[in-house]
Image (tube, grey):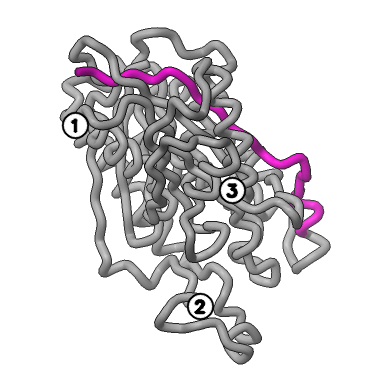
Amino acid sequence: MGIKIIGTGSYVPEKILTNFDIEKMVDTTDEWIRERSGITERRVAADDQATSDLATIAAQNAMSMANIEADELDLIVVATVTEDMSFPSTACIIQNNIKAVNAVCFDIHAACTGFIYGLDIVTSMMSSGRYNKAMLIGAEKLTTITDYEDRSTNFLFGDAAGAIIFSNTDDSKNCLLGSSLRSDGSFKDILNMPGGGSRVPIRENNVSDRLHYLKMDGPKVFKLAVNTMVKVSTEAIVAADVTVDELKWIIPHQANLRIINGVGKRLKVSTDKVFINVDKFGNSSSATTILSLDQLVRSGKVESGDKILLTAFGAGLTSGAAVLEW
């Protein structure tokens, strides 16, 4: 039994937050932000939009491309760190929104690498033969955990969602040609959100200490990001039994333009193969790679048989890469 991709979809909120808007919040400049990140703007969800709302629209767009009804789905997996609430899962909320009454639903929590982890999880579950059509979603409302008083991080993050739908096939061909996943908990403190869990429950004092916002040691994350993404990308390429030259596209996690360029250079790929949209959308964590893939597909730049490398790193520290064949 094989597995193929039958649809993708994405959604970004209408509101645009520019660097010039951020200049009004803290002591920073458009030039400083662009030099350090390559970002000029990012999207911000409305106050009444939760992560599940963004994901629901992306899911509906993916189902439209796949030409299926929601009740045909038997598995929905959502990668997110900004779930609607601690429980129930955001996947269950989306299931109800789209009326996917036959789907098994759960969330995964691997930060910016969540969508890559999800590719392995979903295709492995489908390989069992127990699931015929599955949807994997990467969705975030990161602006809810962004500290806009912190000039070192407030310009990095935006909101977005993307979805991909897989279907089993009668042949043995699998669209996931190879992957590599890694984790290193010794770096757990360089990128985290201290408050809100069982160790630091939200109380009045730690809200005033701003512990419910994302914290990041930027220089350490930057140094690790390029090395880890190159390592897992190389491993995934080997596992897929392809060469770098055979890759039509490289989709790196859209965290920072300098990181993206560093990964491309280390992998020795031409710049025209590396997809970039971080300038317009910023870092939307688990949504960046699927948002990018959907944009590529809908632009007509992906054809049957094309091989695409997706690679990411995130809090944990997690990292992962996967080679897909369209």
Q: Nearer the viewer, residue 319 or 177?
A: 177
The answer to whether residue 15 is left or right of residue 217 is right
Contact between labelled residues 2 and 1, with CB atoms less than 8 Å apart: no
Gap in Å between the C-alphas at discs 2 and 3? 22 Å
Q: Position of residue 189 (x, y in %)?
A: 38, 72
The answer to whether residue 73 is left or right of residue 33 is left
* Residue highlighted by disc 3: 52
Q: Which of the two labelled residues, at mark 1 and mark 2, occupies the earlier sequence position? A: 1
Q: Residue at x 23, y 35 (%)?
A: 124
* Residue highlighted by disc 1: 128
Q: Which of the two labelled residues, at mark 2 and mark 3, occupies the earlier sequence position? A: 3
Q: Residues within 10 Å of mark 2 (few under 14, many from 20)?
A: some
Quadrant for the N terminus, please.
Answer: top left
Q: Main secondary structure of the magenta part?
A: strand
Helix or strand or loop: what does disc 1 sit on?
Answer: loop
* Residue highlighted by disc 2: 195
- The verdict on residue 11 being magenta is yes
Q: Which of the two labelled residues, at mark 1 and mark 3, occupies the earlier sequence position? A: 3
The amino acid at mark 3 is Ser
Q: Is residue 228 visible?
A: yes
